[in-house]
Image (cartoon, grey):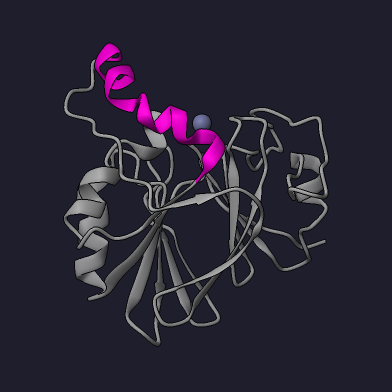
Amino acid sequence: MPRVRSKGVTIVCSTSEQLPNTYFICLESANEAVIIDVGFHLEWCRQQIAKYQTRLVGILLTHGHLSHVARAAELSETSGKVSVYLARDDLHLVQMLPSFADSQGYCGVKSPRVSILMDQGGQFTLGSSLVVNYHLTPGHTPGSCCFKIEKNHFVGDLWDREKHCYGEAKAWNHEVQRLSSSTYQALLNKGDRVHPGHGSSWQLDS
Ligand SMILES: [Zn+2]
């Protein structure tokens, strides 16, 4: 199970061959954790929370596709209705999840109650001191979003290690801070780590 330590945070990835990645990020000084993209890894998420003896303080969704969101509602509900973050432009996808999941043969999928709808890029603090920067990066879905914690970028399905893009936005709009994937890549700095929705993470050495 891949695990990364980064200036006070521990990051664990659920990597499996068939399913998208779920990331567990634990702030060591406060025993607080966030999870990015729950997907179907509900039990794995619960195991990490117990193993690290942490309190879950947020669920962040990079976009509204079933395989990244499926069990987010249950995780939120059984963790004290912890806040769920999603870009507003993907809310329609999440609201359609139960019927879409049924049509795909997955029973019992619920739409998570989204507490924070993101309209533009910015920054928020989860728990006592876990600072999260985020950028809206439409293309793969209308409301795709990248999250940055310390020097770690969680890019969902924006692109993978082979720089394969799953959907490129054409527009660059300063007013609403929406970035194309290539523009977002230009924001990365040497030493940053990129954690994609599929496949393994990598570190920028140039
Ligand atoms: Zn996707």
The vertical placement of 27 against 193, above or below, is below
**Outermost residue, top direction?**
103
The vertical placement of 75 against 170, above or below, is below
Whether residue 188 is in magenta: the answer is: no
Is 82 left, or right, of 140 in this rendering?
Answer: left
**At x 29% / y 12%, what residue is drawn?**
103
**At x 16% / y 55%, what residue is drawn?**
78
Visible in this render: residue 192?
Answer: yes
- Residue 17, quarter of picture: top left
First to last magenta residue range: 87-104
Position of residue 87 measured from the top left corner of the image (x, y, whole percent): 53, 44
Position of residue 68 measured from the top left corner of the image (x, y, whole percent): 41, 38
Whether residue 95 is in magenta: the answer is: yes
Is 122 left, or right, of 85 in this rendering?
Answer: right
Position of residue 156 measured from the top left corner of the image (x, y, whole percent): 55, 43
Is 139 left, or right, of 198 in this rendering?
Answer: right
Q: Quadrant of the N terminus?
A: bottom left
Q: Main secondary structure of the magenta part?
A: helix
The vertical placement of 39 against 121, above or below, is above
